[in-house]
Amino acid sequence: QVQLVESGGGLVQPGGSLRLSCAASGRFLSVNRMAWYRQDPGKQRELVAAITSGGGTNYADSVKGRFTISRDNVKNTVYLQMNSLKPEDTAVYYCNADVRPYISSTYYPYWGQGTQVTVSS
């Protein structure tokens, strides 16, 4: 069973910073693409940032220059450093990863449980 466990959300003032972490655990052979999405109530889930196993990244236009995604392939962990946070960044943030389970030739998408980020004064 593969699990993605997130941590690091919370309440922060506008202009502040937070760092999210997401670790993959369980029985699996490898992790490919890892990403962060976010969702506000009543809105569609949107991609925030993604990173390949080789380190290639892409970001939503709304977070470019403020957020940085990184990963530790040894720990199978992805991070999202969020700086200069704005109230519109408030959402539940979800970790997503394409994981190849043990004894499988296919990668499957897995999701974390979500962590709340609230930006408010």
Image (cartoon, helix red, strand yellow):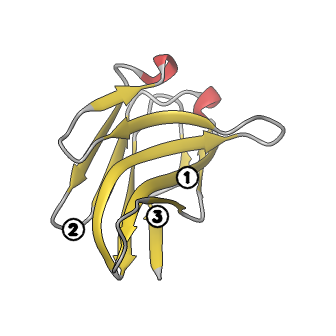
Q: Quadrant of the C terminus?
A: top right
Q: Which residue is mark 3?
A: 6
- Asked which quadrant contains residue 23, the reply is bottom left
Q: Position of residue 30 (x, y in %)?
A: 27, 65
Relative depth, front residue between 27 and 25: 27
**Residue under circle 2?**
75
Q: Position of residue 12 (x, y in %)?
A: 52, 44
Mark 3 or mark 2, whichever is nearer to me: 2
Instruction: State the separation of the CA atoms marked 3 and 1.
Output: 8 Å
Q: Are marks 2 and 1 in contact (CB under 8 Å)?
A: no
The reply to whether dot 3 and dot 1 touch (C-beta < 8 Å) is: yes
User: Which amino acid does the dot numbered 1 rest on?
Assistant: Tyr
* Mark 1 secondary-structure assignment: strand
Residue pushed farthest front? 105
Task: Tell me what residue is drawn at x 35 percent, y 82 percent.
Answer: 27
Callout 2 secondary element: loop
Instruction: Name the residue that disc number 1 marks.
Output: 94
Looking at the image, is mark 3 or mark 1 earlier in the sequence? 3
Q: Answer with mark 2 or mark 1, whichever residue precedes in sequence.
A: 2
Number of residues whose C-alpha sits closer than 10 Å to that of mark 2, classed few (under 14), some (14–19) or many (20 or more): few
Q: Earlier in the sequence, mark 3 or mark 2?
A: 3
Q: Residues within 10 Å of mark 1 (few under 14, many from 20)?
A: many
